[in-house]
Image (cartoon, rainbow, N blue to C red):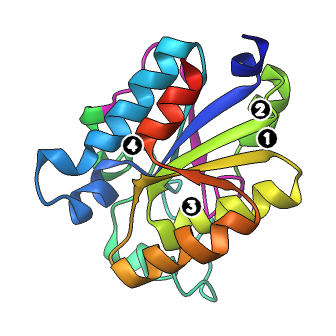
Amino acid sequence: MNHHAQTALLVMDVQNGIAGRYMKDESTLQPFQRAVSAARKAGVSVIFVRVAFSEGYPEAGPRNKMFSHLAQAGGMTIADASTQIHDSVMPQSGEPVVTKYRVSAFAGSNLEVILRAKGITNLVLCGIATSGVVLSTVREAADKDYAITVLKDACLDGDPEVHQVLVEKVFPRQADVMTVEEWANTLA
């Protein structure tokens, strides 16, 4: 069972301001809920990752195409409702909530410190969006020599074609790609 102790499920950007944009109904986040409960049951660490900025947006620079507009738009600060983890996957006591300042889960966050402290070598990724946090985190985690699994049905993207290309052609070069159910079965 030691293998489970070295594994963490990263639940990435499943926060109010982001999940809300992708939700058709309550069922949209069910794969995320199933992944979280399977991890907890098997003794796999669950770590939540969100994107948020300090008051005044000192981390969002003018050259950053994705985040430069934030200062005008407002919201997305650390205390803001939009950056809190969505209720459907509410963190339990002792489950870290990591704040990142860019697209990748590692960008400006304490994620790596937590992984090192817990002796984690295997990352299981789910998140929103496939072409955003999941892609950036797969690439960076692979370069850092983590073993990676991507839960393809617990990844959402606004563009189904982009999602398809990533899970079928791009991610498999660096990660095992499977459904939540397939992964849950490997934990049993």
Which SS class for mark 1?
A: helix
**Is mark 4 in CB contact (under 8 Å) with mark 2?**
no
How many marks are shown on the rendered structure? Answer: 4
Residue 109, placed above or below residue 129: above
Which SS class for mark 3?
A: helix
In this view, the residue in front, 177 or 85, is: 177
Q: Nearer the viewer, mark 4 or mark 3?
A: 3
Examine the structure image and report whether residue 150 is included in the region drawn in magenta: no
Residue at the disc numbered 4: 79
**22 left or right of 51?**
left
Decide which of tag 2 and tag 3 comes sooner along the chain: 2
**Is mark 3 in CB contact (under 8 Å) with mark 1?**
no
**Is mark 2 in CB contact (under 8 Å) with mark 1?**
yes
Decide which of tag 4 and tag 3 comes sooner along the chain: 4
Residue at the disc numbered 2: 115
In this view, the residue in front, 31 or 90, is: 31
Q: CA distance from mark 3 to mark 1?
A: 16 Å
**178 left or right of 28?**
right
Decide which of tag 3 and tag 1 comes sooner along the chain: 1
Q: CA distance from mark 4 to mark 2?
A: 25 Å
The C terminus sits in image quarter: top right
What amino acid is labelled 4 in the image?
Answer: Ala
Residue 85 seen anywhere in this rendered image of the structure = no
Q: CA distance from mark 2 to mark 3?
A: 17 Å
Q: Nearer the viewer, mark 4 or mark 1?
A: 1
What amino acid is labelled 3 in the image?
Answer: Val
Q: Could you say which disc has been placed on residue 134 in the image?
A: 3
Q: Residues within 10 Å of mark 2 (few under 14, many from 20)?
A: some
Examine the structure image and report whether residue 105 is included in the region drawn in magenta: yes
Percent x, y of residue 15: 36, 48
Q: Which residues are magenta?
A: 89-107
